[in-house]
Image (tube, rainbow, N blue to C red):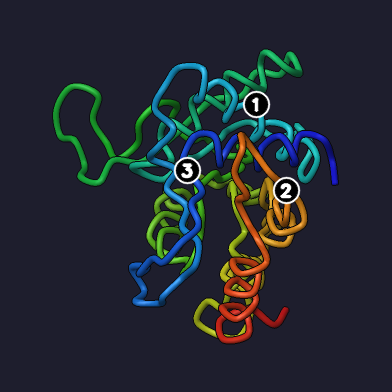
Amino acid sequence: MEQYKQEFIDFMVESDVLKFGDFTLKSGRKSPFFMNAGAYVTGSQLRRLGEYYAKAINDNFGLDFDVLFGPAYKGIPLSVVTAVAISELYGKEVRYCSNRKEIKDHGDTGILLGSKLKDGDRVVMIEDVTTSGKSIEETYPIVTGQAKVEIKGLVVSLDRMEKGKSDKSALKEIADSYGFPTAAIVTMDDVKTCLHNREKDGRMIIDDEMYAKIEEYYDTYGAKG
């Protein structure tokens, strides 16, 4: 596993973004882990988050693209901090773009924030986590409806590796449905490998009991492909 992935897993735990216990997800599923990207709140956290996204984008898609698109609302700061990180780490200038929930009819009019989209733009979409693909269903028509763009891929922070609408993972369903690649900074397999029976700051994050709960969860909800 790449060093930055191990660092990112520790970073999620340190930032109280990735938690282990008993959680009820929006889908109604009872999960032994939960991720809340809204817990990244400080300047240093956001700077580091952008750097991890930038490295994952470079590893999976390269830097031959023009625009980072982050769906409202959580995708807005993600696209901004990652655009900054790509500039600082790689000297590559990309534009950021996001959508509004409601079309603005005065001043800076339209449905987009940040850069306008132009014909020929190559776009990487960026999100926190995808469990159902619903946000892409909503935003893909917005992006492709603004100009003749090429979607280079979608990147999320954590691949939960669980079933979407079918037995495939939500990320795989998106790739199959829309025809562009998907990637994550880390997967739950990475998380289990990194944290199982490993003490961090004096506490065990995933002990044998929690590991068994995670495995049981995936016996029921784990994606097959």
Instruction: Determine the CA span between mark 3 and mark 2.
Output: 18 Å
Residue at 65% x, 60% y is 207
Left or right relative to 50: residue 199: right
Element type at marker 3? loop
Query: Which numbered dot is residue 198?
Result: 2
Q: Residue furthest right?
A: 1
Give the percent coordinates (x, y) of residue 20. 50, 57
Q: Residues within 10 Å of mark 1 (few under 14, many from 20)?
A: many
Q: Which mark is residue 17?
A: 3
Of label 1 and label 3, which has the lower sequence position?
Answer: 3
User: Of helix, strand and loop, which one carries label 2?
Assistant: loop
Question: Pointer 2: residues within 10 angstroms few (<14), some, or many (20+)?
Answer: some
Instruction: Work out how far the residue at label 1 is from the one at label 3, CA to CA, in angstroms.
Output: 17 Å
Going by the numbered disc 2, the residue's amino acid type is Arg
* Residue type, label 3: Val
Q: Residue at x 49, y 67 (%)?
A: 32
